[in-house]
Amino acid sequence: MRKLLASLALGLAALGVFGVSHAQDTAASAPVTATAPAEAPSAAAPAASEAAPAPAEAASAAAAPAPVPNKGDTTWMMVSTLLVILMTIPGLALFYGGLVRSKNMLSVLMQVMVTFSLIVVLWFVYGYSLAFTEGNQFIGGLDRLMMKGIWDNVAGTFANGATFSKGVVIPEIVFAAFQATFAGITCALIVGAFAERAKFSAVLLFMVLWFTFSYAPMAHMVWFWMGPDAYTGKDVVDAMNGKAGLIWQWGALDFAGGTVVHINAAVAGLVGAYMVGKRIGYGKEAFTPHSLTLTMVGSALLWVGWFGFNAGSALEANGFAALAFINTFAATAAAVLGWIIGESLLKGKASMLGAASGAVAGLVAITPAAGNVGIGGALIIGVLAGLICLWGVTGLKKLLGADDSLDVFGVHGIGGILGALLTGVFNSPNLGGPSAVADWVTVGMVAPADYSIVNQVIIQAKAVGLTIVWSGVVSVIAYKIVDLVIGLRVSEEEEREGLDISAHGETAYHK
């Protein structure tokens, strides 16, 4: 029990961006989706007492039993973790694999699977600690190095992590596993941008560098805070806010990773497409997908797994998990329709590739908004994602001039930016959104009359801008280091032969 209470007092970080996103060690957080700065409560928020608690009240609070994890919440989080693994392997792997030429199918499967595995190992060694322990506003510390202190094997006790309800917790070990899948899929997403010409060893070295200096800091800046139970009174608000990640302090809303996952990975992919260079024959030869059947299967698995990604980010089996679930469902379906309608108007035909791409675009765009908007807002975000990401992989791609092989930036970058900005719009209670917490001491919400869409969108844009710059700078440096040490690209002969044979000595199909 002493170990359990000590771990709660450490406040190793409920993960969340002013709302129902991710939360971690320390107390627990409120069952809401987004928050305004705690130091600026709205008129609707009940006023917290300025006075210090009476000695009797303090003694009573100190004697209160430590919260115990609910088996339903714990089970839901383990299921959500499995769903995110399903998203990556086989979902993302098959989605990407079907889009490349048959001679490179296995190379893409390998890059996705091994990247995911590599990052999961690094996550448990040091990544989790850098992202979700107290450090400064940019990066955490080493309190959880090698998962130290997450459980006491002698006593048989486990540290607890916060959910988004005060006094409600889940085992921190489950939270760490859930977050490991986020880190893994984020790095795997990058693979699609330089598919068919990058060295396997170069890919892995780049992932180590980028994960350490881009993913972990971004996760800390967006999602680390001290947890709602740390907000015991107005006298501690400033101190608790000051320990949070920079973007959390700004008040940015990111339910499940619009900035941390999608924009972060997309920028790294775009930089990689430039620095690795265009595929041989790009612009002169047709690089048609070798199996749209597998791409469709992959996109379907992504859709199913994404329910764990988004609804699991509520960290409880509650109404906000259900809101994120239905929004993920609705926005994705709307994006499929938006994409194929746009495609029909542009090309005269709707394609299977378009439908699959539209689904992914909708999933990306709803990610930061999943528990932060109402169902109507989710439908609008979905339709717009389908239309705008279609432009991202056609018109914008031509303007950028990069050989982004599988349109990582056009879908994940544009979709992530769109979703992040529109979260600030449709979070408004005047537009059917759940609003934001104005004061974590009382968990009072911003009143409809006090919610400013303009102000929130500006905050969202700041978060997007910092993510682009941070990932861009880290990516340029990391690619350059890899190029100097290993070299980024295979030889022309190896590229023409195909990476399946040249890099792995195997073929996906025996003819």
Image (cartoon, helix red, strand yellow):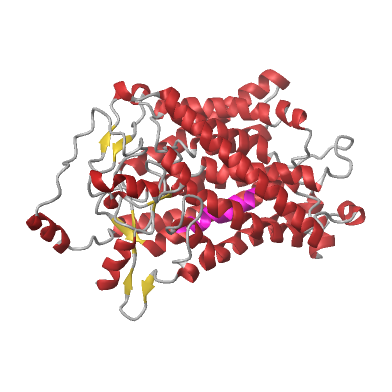
Q: Is 3 placed above or below 168 here?
A: below
Nearest to the observer: residue 216 or residue 489 = 216
Magenta-highlighted residues: 178-190
Q: Residue at x 76, y 58 (%)?
A: 482
**Residue 297 visible, this orientation:** no
Return the residue found at the far bottom.
154
Considering the whole magenta stretch, tell me its main secondary structure: helix
Nearest to the observer: residue 313 or residue 206 = 206
**Residue 504 visible, this orientation:** yes
Return the residue found at the far left.
56
Q: Is 139 placed above or below 3 here?
A: above
Q: Is 133 placed above or below 440 here?
A: below
Q: Is residue 180 magenta?
A: yes
Q: Is 280 placed above or below 8 here?
A: above
Q: Residue at x 67, y 46 (%)?
A: 473
Question: Where's the C terminus, which quadrant?
Answer: bottom right
| Picture quadrant where residue 385 is located | top right
Relative image position of residue 433 (x, y in whole percent): 36, 29
Relative image position of residue 373 (x, y in whole percent): 40, 31
Q: Is residue 89 left or right of residue 139?
A: right
Q: Is residue 61 magenta?
A: no
Total numbered circles:
0
Relative image position of residue 393 (x, y in whole percent): 70, 32
Relative image position of residue 419 (x, y in whole percent): 52, 33
Nearest to the observer: residue 61 or residue 372 = 61
Q: Is residue 96 left or right of residue 467?
A: right
Nearest to the observer: residue 65 or residue 357 = 65
Q: Is residue 358 left or right of residue 60?
A: right
